[in-house]
Image: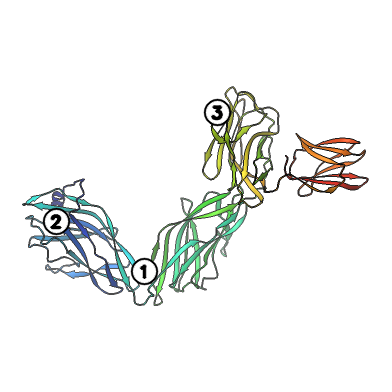
Amino acid sequence: MKGLRIFCLMAALLTISSAVKAECRLSIPATTIEAGSSQSISIDLENTEGVTAFQFCIKFPNGFSVNSMTNEDEETVPAITLSERKKSKHSITMQQQEDGSYKIVVLSTSNQVFSGNSGAIINISVTPSATVQNGIYEILMSEIAICPITDGVIGETIKQEDFTATITINNKSQSNEVHASLSLGTEELEAGSISPLYINLTNNIEITAAQLNIMLPQGINIVETTNEDGDNVPNVSLTERKKSKHNVTARQQEDGSYTIAALSTTNQPFTGNDGALIKLNVSISATMTGTQEILLSNIVLVPLVEGKPGISITQEPVTAQISISNSGGGTISGDNTLTVNRSTVYHNEPAYIGIEMKNNKAICAIQFNIKLPQGVNIVKEYNEDDEFAPVIELTSRKKSSHELSFKEKEGNEYFVMAYSLSNATFKDNSGEIVRLKVQAEENLPEGEYGIVLSNVIMTTSDEEKIEQEAYSGTIDVSSKTGIEETGGDSNITIKSTEGGIAIYGTANNDIISVYDVDGKCIAERLCKSGNSAINTERTRNIIVTVSRNGKVIFTRKFLKTK
């Protein structure tokens, strides 16, 4: 009851004030303590006016314990005492909280003021465990309230902000610089694959156990494997840095993250001081591309001190970035589909990427998200409203009432919507419906890249919604342009036309063949004397040949339509 009365009295004295006064404050001076030894830590009070009471909460780091003592009533209590600055009527009470912190209240029932204006006001005897590593540790001070008094009159309570003090530990059994941390080891993964993802351990002290939570982005999942008991478990394993008695477990949490723990029942240390420690086999969605974030949290490492587990090292959460490379190649099936026409994008001049719609129903509106590869950007130009905006436009398949709108999102992604307020349906049943004017950045390597369509919805005139799963089409990035001549009859010339190729100077029964860059014949025609034409959906990245009497007499490569 005595303690309760004191706390109630303190509550009455410490009336809340929103003002923060710098004239009176508590602090903890920087101190160095030997691990395993007892030492006093002081709480200092600096005040330019009289102080009669104060309170605060203090929390020591893991591995620190407050020593005990016997008070004048022969009770065992924490060794937390007032300094010589107290007066005869000052008393101190303390209470340990559920989180391990101590709440301390000091007051005088007769409103006596402390002597002096600076220096220690409270001394706390602590002992850091002999297993605490070398380093700087934090002490948290919170709920600080100071009660000033002037001419016997109690002033407004001073509310001091929470602060963190530091204490240095010297452990003679350890080196001067102690470091141990986990990090993500894999920087790039391939979309549509099952790939290893590594977690690295860097340490200059012996570590026997590690634990963490890992939150993977949507679209990346740890694959399962069957263990020796026939159970399906996450495919997580330790690398060659483990010892024979080390094992690892992984368990998925309700929020989708995984808790991973690696330990040795005989306190063996991991081998080495750097490199991969934990391997996760993960599946990557075929529609992922670009930069993704992975969160490592609740990281705890257990060091060895003279062969025994020491005080755990807690690491701050780490947000790491990985890159997902996507070379496309996806397919989509159905009677009503939106797909990306395979196109070539250039470094030195703009080109178009077409979104094709094939439909056997009357479609009046479409929407989709399109995610471009990093380094392929939509060209901006002034539109008819004199706005400098990305060039995303409807093709001739639109009706007069069709409108197009789009919104740029994060990660080189756009949301696109095309609709008609009068529910007019698009023309035809196949062909490009939307096209984007794009250009590749100069430092983007040549090659195949995935371009992802997601959130695809097509709406019919009778308001039926047709949804399509996400997929990744393919575009080619090239720095080459123009027509490359590879030899042949100088009397034959070729140029591209709308919808095909025109050939001049052919003879009767010449055969014109059109191949893609992989060597597949995509069009062929028997010629008559004079000029000929051949229709082909592709007029770029193709090879055109003219054969006469079974022999190729002319070859041209079209790497870009002029």
Tag shown at residue 132: none
Task: Report which quarter residue 468 is drawn in.
Answer: top right
Q: Residue at x 18, y 47 (%)?
A: 16
Q: Are marks 3 and 1 in contact (CB under 8 Å)?
A: no
Marking on residue 311: 1
417 in relation to 265, above or below: above
Q: Are marks 3 and 2 in contact (CB under 8 Å)?
A: no
| In front of the other: 38 or 85 | 85
For residue 162, side relative to residue 404 (left or right) = left
Q: Position of residue 101 (x, y in %)?
A: 26, 60
Left or right placement of residue 97 versus residue 211 in this view? left
User: In the rendered image of this protein, does residue 178 appear above or below residue 492?
Assistant: below
- Direction top: furthest residue: 422
Say which label, 1 or 2, has the lower sequence index. 2
Front residue of 237 and 296: 296
Find residue 70 and report its image quarter. bottom left
Few, some or many residues within 10 Å of mark 2 (<14, 14–19, 20+): few
Callout 2 amino acid: Thr
Q: Nearer the viewer, mark 3 or mark 2?
A: 3
Residue bearing the label numbered 2: 48
Q: Earlier in the sequence, mark 3 or mark 2?
A: 2
Q: Where is mark 3, residue-wise?
A: 385
Circle 3 residues within 10 Å: few <14, some 14–19, many ≥20: few
**Residue type for callout 3:** Asp
**Residue for point 55% across, 52% down:** 220
Q: Residue at x 45, y 71 (%)?
A: 265
What is the three-letter code of the residue carrying label 1? Answer: Ile
Residue 92 place in picture, x, y as percent: 15, 61
Q: Nearer the viewer, mark 1 or mark 2?
A: 2
> In the displayed structure, would residue 235 be above or below residue 135?
above
